[in-house]
Image (cartoon, helix red, strand yellow):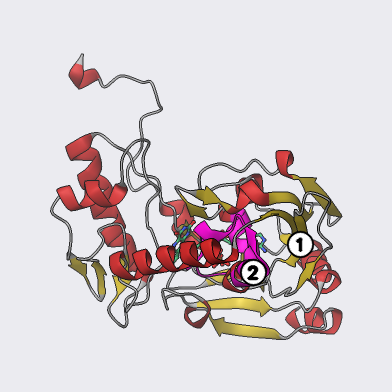
Amino acid sequence: MARELQSRVKGPVRIGEPLARYTTFRIGGPADVLVEPVDEEDLARALAWARDHGVPVTLLGGGSNVLVPDEGLRGLVVRVGLDGIRWEDPDPQGRCGVVVGAGTVLARLVHEAARRGYQGLEPCAGIPGTVGGALVMNAGTRDGTIGQVVDWVRVVEPGGRLAVWPRERCGFTYRSSRMQVEGVPVVAARLVLAPGDRQAIAAAIRRYTAYRQRTQPLRYPNCGSVFKNPPGDASGRLIEACGLKGLRHGRAQISDQHANFIINLGGATAEDVLALMTTAWRCVRDRFGVVLEPEVRLLGSLARRWPPDPVAPAGSSDPNQA
Ligand SMILES: Cc1cc2nc3c(=O)[nH]c(=O)nc-3n(C[C@H](O)[C@H](O)[C@H](O)COP(=O)(O)OP(=O)(O)OC[C@H]3O[C@@H](n4cnc5c(N)ncnc54)[C@H](O)[C@@H]3O)c2cc1C
């Protein structure tokens, strides 16, 4: 079957490819089949092959926000490497449209925008991964997200049709989007950026980068924030207040620098990470009554194992408290 895929697409097809090397966590077993399409048509052909054979598909960008199970991923893993940045002429107000391929490294876009004197992407400075992953995750910080500067996103709809979704259709919310909820592949996007002061933009980028270097355990493989922040609070604060900083399981550790980061000390497994996530989740629930939601995308079989305990539907009362 995989040989047939190879004959349909131009990009490389790999069988049983270990995925650890494709994730910033450096964790993850093999993909049944990994394909790296060379262009949008190639991607569409790979997806059509999967549809024809009833094979499940997992999209991967830079792998900076995923936990891949130790047994790997069944079906087809599509590594989206559609790379390219096309700047348009500015409009009369000086605002500039830019069309970006989903596989473009986000940092490259942030730095090109800064060099040209366009603002809006500074909060994304220092965020690893691709533009496609950033759109799906609505990546950013408290100060702004990529979704705020999106004009439209080009996606492959479930039937295989390429479609342009205007921003209103993309459902950007805190670290989520309609593309994420519906598992829709993103192939490109158009962003619109406002003109700004080059020096101020460069200074903001330096500030964001320095803050990350000061507060995040960047010497070890990790996936960024493990949990989303609950409204009005910070997951790192809650996990730290539970006394969990520095807790180890196997070769994974809750960072003693930032409690919402789990680091791979070398040779950590997905099971090690899941065990620490489970401990943190239960402690925060039991101590603060807060149910944390993972920000990291748990792929394959891991998705079916979360949450670790049943969660009472919002608004339901605890009979023990009655
Ligand atoms: C050190 C560090 C710091 C970080 N800091 C931040 C931060 O400040 N703010 C923040 O928001 N995030 C942060 N992150 C998380 C991560 O970098 C972002 O979420 C990033 O945008 C993910 O992009 P990616 O290409 O690596 O996506 P991946 O990790 O490859 O994928 C993420 C999700 O998107 C899906 N996906 C990827 N590409 C596509 C596509 N083309 N079409 C459809 N689905 C796709 C995947 O299936 C997966 O569900 C950090 C991560 C690290 C390691």
Rendered residue at 47%/61% (across/down): 204
Rendered residue at 33%/61% (across/down): 274
Q: Position of residue 10 (x, y in %)?
A: 82, 83
Q: In the rendered view, does 268 fall on the left or right side of 286?
A: right
Secondary structure of residue under mark 2? helix
Q: Are marks 1 and 2 in contact (CB under 8 Å)?
A: yes
Q: In the rendered view, does 304 fall on the left or right side of 36?
A: left
Task: Look at the image and tell me in which quarter the C terminus lies.
Answer: top left
Task: Look at the image and tell me in which quarter the N terminus lies.
Answer: bottom right
Secondary structure of residue under mark 1? strand
| Label 2 neighbour load within 10 Å: few <14, some 14-19, many 20+ | many
Query: Relative to residue 129, is residue 192 depicted above or below?
Result: above
Q: Which mark is residue 98?
A: 1
Question: Is any part of residue 58 visible from this angle?
Answer: no
Q: In the rendered view, does 26 fall on the left or right side of 74?
A: left
- Tell me the residue that label 2 is attached to: 109
Question: Is any part of residue 15 visible from this angle?
Answer: yes
Q: CB at mark 2 closer than 8 A to ligand 1? A: no
Q: Determine the image quadrant of residue 197.
A: bottom right
Magenta highlight range:
111-136
| Label 1 neighbour load within 10 Å: few <14, some 14-19, many 20+ | some
Q: Position of residue 32 (x, y in %)?
A: 61, 76
Q: Amino acid at mark 1?
A: Val
**Sooner in the amino-acid sequence: mark 1 or mark 2:** 1
Q: Position of residue 226 (x, y in %)?
A: 37, 57
Q: Determine the image quadrant of residue 154.
A: bottom right
Rendered residue at 82%/69% (across/down): 40
Q: Position of residue 48 (x, y in %)?
A: 82, 65
